[in-house]
Image (cartoon, rainbow, N blue to C red):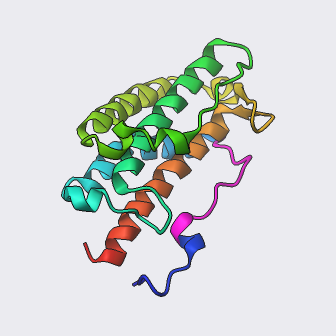
Amino acid sequence: METKDTIDLEQLKYPVGKFVRGTKAESPERIAACISVITTFPKNLHDAVSDLTDAQLDTPYRPGGWTIRQLVHHIADSHSQSLHRFKLALTEDKPVIKPYNEALWAEHVDARTLPLDASFGIIAGTHARWVSLMQHMNATDFARVFVHPEQDREISLSEALELYVWHSTHHLAHITKWREREGI
């Protein structure tokens, strides 16, 4: 079992490792496995935090990190952005997406203080729509791209899917590893 003294800051920041840019879900089997993660994530996230007190929700999951509350609200912000990016890529030719400053969004009063129910609703609704959309996409659809201006590159929907599987497991691990370290 990891303790506060034995885990390094890099493990705290990236508990499942860093995302490898360019990773793509291309086989039907891998796409189905990724969609399964996106399908179950809202319940897994809810289960990971539903019994926490307000004091625990307002505790950073790592030194210098967001609180658990900010993390859940960030997930709602980020995953809803991803659904919109999928829809843009499916309806426009290489759309340029609008990046946002996630660190500043996490500092707004809603992310710091609002109960989690609002974001659970966003996450559950976003994932339900996103899963339905992806279940009806084909290989050509997953090959469609959007342009990320800050990264100065095209990102395929097959890569975006892998990124959000990573994002989901990454942030869920922040919470579950924190709980393990704290004995909660």
Figure quadrant of the C terminus: bottom left
Coordinates of residue 82 in the picture (x, y in percent): 54, 32
Coordinates of residue 77 in the picture (x, y in percent): 45, 35
| Residue 23 included in the magenta stretch of the image | yes
Q: Is residue 156 left or right of residue 103?
A: right
Q: Is residue 19 above or below residue 158?
A: below
Figure quadrant of the N terminus: bottom left
Q: Nearer the viewer, residue 20 or 74?
A: 74
Q: Nearer the viewer, residue 82 or 159?
A: 82
Q: Is residue 47 above or below residue 148?
A: below
Q: Residue at x 27, y 43 (%)?
A: 116
Q: Residue reaching furthest right?
A: 152
Coordinates of residue 65 in the picture (x, y in percent): 48, 60
Q: Is residue 49 above or below residue 96?
A: below
Using the rendered view, name the quadrant where residue 115 is placed: top left
Coordinates of residue 40 in the picture (x, y in percent): 36, 45
| Residue 15 included in the magenta stretch of the image | yes
Q: Main secondary structure of the magenta part?
A: loop
Tally of marks: 0
Q: Which residues are magenta?
A: 12-26
Q: Residue at x 36, y 55 (%)?
A: 68
